[in-house]
Amino acid sequence: MITKISELIEAASWTRVLLYTILVLLALFYLMPVYMTVITALKHPENISLATSWFPPRQVNWSSFVQAYQKLIPNFTNSLILAVSGTILSAILGSLNGYVFSKWKFKGHETVFTLMLFGMFIPYQIVLLPLFQTLRRLNLYGGLPGLILAHVVYGIPITTLIFRNFYARIPDSLVESAQMDGAGFFGLYFRVMAPLSVPGFVVVAIWQFTQIWNEFLWGITLTSHSSNPITVALSQMAGGQATTWNMPMAGAILAALPVLLVYILMGRYFIRGLLAGSVKG
Amino acid sequence: MNWRRHKDKFWALLTLFPSLALVGVFVYGFIGRTFFVSITDWGKGAALAENPTINVIGLGNYGQLFTGFLNARFRQSLVNAAFYSVLIIVGAIIVGLFLAILLDRQPAGESFFRTIFLYPMSLSFIVTGTIWRWLLSPGGGINRLPTFIGLPPLRFRWLSSEGSILTFNWQNLPFITGGIVAFVILTLAYRSWKSGQEKRAASMAGAALILVLWIAFGRGFTPKILPYPEEHGLNLATLGIILAAVWQYSGYTMAMFLAGLRGVSTDLREAAELDGANQFQYYTRVAIPMVKPVVLSAVIIMAHISLKMFSLIFAMTGPDNAETGHPAVLMYLKSFRANNFAVGAAIAVVLFLMASLFIVPYLVSAYRERRA
């Protein structure tokens, strides 16, 4: 500790001071929306005015949170069901696919893989109308199962990509020696790959959970009112013209809480998923 | 042994099959279907009928969108989309690179700062859009910040301004596009000339010359795409949305650049320092050229994200605001409010082609790299 402080003093040349000044100012800028959201959510609606928008509340009022919670809890539950089941299913599919693409290469596997990756980059408007019609035909339109199906299918490319890159780092010699011991396709997966996959599953789970929780376009086009995910409900809560801002701000905090918790607790894995989004590597 | 390997291969392919089938239908099948719907009249608006009579009408929907009297809004959203993409890509890359360089200096509390710069990335566009709408209210939020240092408040109407800059006449679009294409071809020609492929460079320069000649003298014989002049430009109301998007995504580019900067070996850094390079020179001459491939990836990823602006615009100005519109928003309105699936599909195709312009070359080059 002592050495660290002396190092700090030594390094405190003017460039260091400048560096920290800029960093602190930028950090304030990045945190500004959080500050504004929290103080607005804690104000009495009649005390919210544009002129005093930056000042903290004189009296803390928690009732906006209670109201927002009561309004949003059905949608919060919907999003939880959606995100958890969608994440589990697409992680399993991605893991199996990644296993095949990294350890059971077949002729043309790179081409097939690239064609699959394409699905990750398309603007989803290009599949929205047929998706809508197909779900209607299958009687899946309006409810959560249809939305889960959509998230699982369009999650296949990214989960496959992350697992493929992850498994590529498991040495082939390990695979070969297991095969010598008589392990077949599934034996190898369950005895060698799956036990080593935990970090891969964490990265994929965090990524998919965040994506599905935050998704809006399918939520608003493919579900009926009672199955709306939280993003849709929040947009409706904030959308009206005569909005008092305490409610939308409290709602925004509720809608952000799960993903923010995941990010703060498991940030390292979140960044890995993020960087996996850039295909090369 | 051989038989068992065949059996295992069979299981491998069988495992892959459901995913391939799903992606085949839900990605490629649906893209094809949307292309088809876009060249029909979709039962003339009876989109919600169980079995509408569908007539193929060719490229009529596209013609209407690009040149029809009633579709000025589509043309403005297309222009908006271009400005959204360019400004968000440039903004996120510059801010992200700047943040990455700051953190590359290894300040105390580096991971704390990294967490702060990156947290917006984990949030939904609906959450951040709702918050930024409040921050950008004309009489409060950001506009009041100058009053804390004794200045008068800003008066800019972030999300409701009706002003527009960099306006151009839609009738000139073919020539403007031609100019941009000519510029790109000339750049490529210059690059192949430098790498010694003179023949290729000459033919490309020739093509660019033809384009330039057409731009200079072609107005007389090129048919007009609109019978009347129509102004489009960068709507000032989009700037607030762009600010929010850059705030949200610069952490992403920061993470990419930071990984790249950390990849520059310490040997190289020490060598640069031995050669007398100061920190500024180290970044401009050594580190930034080294992370050029990251810039390319960042451009692709930000381009792809900027085409997914639907939710941010929806949360910040609502779907009905024409000033801040985007083809993705208009596609939603045409399909799900006006029940005009054919036009909605045509807009989706335009959006898809714009995205493919970035994605296909990227995927092809990644494919080649993996094969090499």
Image: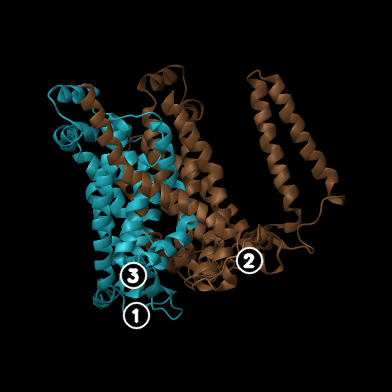
Chain colours: A cyan, B brown
Name the quarter where the C terminus of chain A is drawn.
Answer: top left
Q: Which residue is identified by label 2?
A: B73
Q: Which residue is identified by label 1?
A: A45
Q: Which residue is identified by label 3?
A: A228
* Distance CA(mark 1)–CA(mark 3): 27 Å
Give the residue type at disc 1. Answer: Pro
Give the residue type at disc 2. Answer: Arg
The answer to whether one can see residue B291 in this image is: no
Q: Which element type, helix, strand or loop, lies under badge 1?
A: helix
A181 is higher (above) or lower (below) than A222: above
Q: Which chain letter goes with mark 3?
A: A
Residue at 43 percent across and 69 percent down: it is B134
* Distance CA(mark 3)–CA(mark 2): 29 Å
Discs 3/2, front: 3
Please tell me which residue lies in front, A115 or A225: A115
Q: Which element type, helix, strand or loop, lies under badge 2?
A: helix
Residue at 40 percent across and 42 percent down: it is A116
Name the quarter where the N terminus of chain A is drawn.
Answer: top left
Q: Which element type, helix, strand or loop, lies under badge 3?
A: loop
* Distance CA(mark 2)–CA(mark 1): 37 Å
